[in-house]
Amino acid sequence: MPAIPWSVQADTSAQPRRGRVAERYAAVRAHSVALAAPLSAEDQCIQSMPDASPTKWHLAHTSWFFEAVVLAPHAAAYRPFDGRYMYLFNSYYEALGPRHPRPQRGLLTRPGLAEVHAYRDHVDAAMRSFIAEADDPAWQAAGPLVELGLQHEQQHQELILTDILHALSCNPLLPAYRGGEPPALRLATAPRPIEWIAMPGGTVQVGHAGEGFAFDNETPRHAVLLAPYRMADRLVSCGEYAQFIADGGYRRVQLWLSDGWAAAQAGGWTAPPYWIAPGDARAPSTHWQVFGLDGVRPLEPAAPACNLSFYEAAAYAEWAGARLPTEFEWEAAFDAPGIAQMTGHAWQWTRSSYDPYPGFRPLAGAVGEYNGKFMVGQQVLRGGSRATPEGHARRSYRNFFPPAARWQFSGLRLAKDAAC
């Protein structure tokens, strides 16, 4: 597998650089295990829908990635923990062989959780040796793949949380992922009014600027022409979204895209998926509540609305007399004065389909399947959520999901044309 032509390349001459990679590798891998620690073995085996994966599978797959992409091609002395795992824990890499069907990952009661942890330990030991001892040509080729593997694992760390939240929401007991005292509720009873930040438009440069890591779908950097527009200074709040519901937002067909209306009707959508309506027998209350990682909590009006599909976000924008920003408008406004909540709260749906940038070419080899082959039928999200690992998000990051996806921590920010 050839070296990856990204801005991140291995420093073959500086042993301290390898030391920093080893430290980062250990920290990222330990964080995945820590995220799974509150869960029982039963919790970690469940798959609540085809789009989600069991926690145990995430822990194994992220180890498989280092084994299949780094160790097997570049560490001559490496011996697999169990050759059958190449089939069990491949996700979608056709170049790396067949795989267990995605909707059936929850049937993998074996290997057990202890064996999956032993697999992680085996891969980690081999990776520590490889990082420290690989010769310069091997490190030159594999160093960028190690960083890709770490970024990949951070993506799965967020999926561990989104997937287990969906699984726990299917339990009538609505058990919390985290034990102990939940964080204190914010005292604000209503959000402050949205302020509209004027953006001049014009020709702007978008995409990865060439410093630090970036996925291939963030490149090449290129110019786009934007008309003047206005961007909301914050995300749409739960209180505002509750007003949309109360005003018949889920019953007014004129607010919805055709496919969105069909999805809402087929799914019986009447609110975001983890909202609990007043009078619900699962958690009786006279007010809206929200099920989250800390269990059932009263709805916080000022908190960003979350777990929305693109269709719901677009319908809300229509109701509010606004629209969703394009991904390029979002990127241009990233550090504009007055703009808040761009990262760390909720991924933000944009009106941009997930298409290749001009001049995009998938990378050679198996890693060329990482992003490029999904560039159809998806919408771009920007920003980062409260579950996104620290340091993982950036201005040019392009997340993507099908427009009906609701189990991710996805919200919305409004935009308007300058004349509106």
Image (spheres, helix red, strand yellow):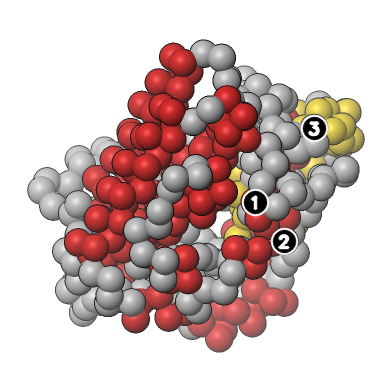
Residue density around tag 1, few if under 14, some if 14–19, many if 20 or more, within 10 Å: some
Give me the C-alpha separation between circle 3 and circle 2.
20 Å
Residue located at (60% from left, 49% from top): 399
Q: Nearer the viewer, residue 82 or 235?
A: 82
Q: CA distance from mark 3 to mark 1?
A: 20 Å
- Name the residue located 69 percent from the left edge and 32 percent from the top edge: 6
Q: Quadrant location of the C terminus? A: top right
Q: Earlier in the sequence, mark 3 or mark 2?
A: 3
Q: Secondary structure at mark 2?
A: helix
Q: Nearer the viewer, residue 105 or 268?
A: 105
CB-based contact (under 8 Å), mark 2 and mark 1? no
What residue is shown with label 1? 367
Which quarter of the figure has residue 197?
Answer: top right
Give 136 or 20, whichever is nearer the viewer: 136
Q: Which mark is residue 221?
A: 3
Residue beneath label 2, please? 373
Q: Is residue 8 above or below residue 114?
A: above
Between discs 2 and 1, the one toward the N terminus: 1
Q: Looking at the image, is 19 positioned above or below residue 349?
A: above
From the viewer's perspective, tell me whether residue 203 is left or right of residue 87: right
Q: Is residue 152 visible?
A: no
Looking at the picture, which amino acid does disc 2 mark? Lys
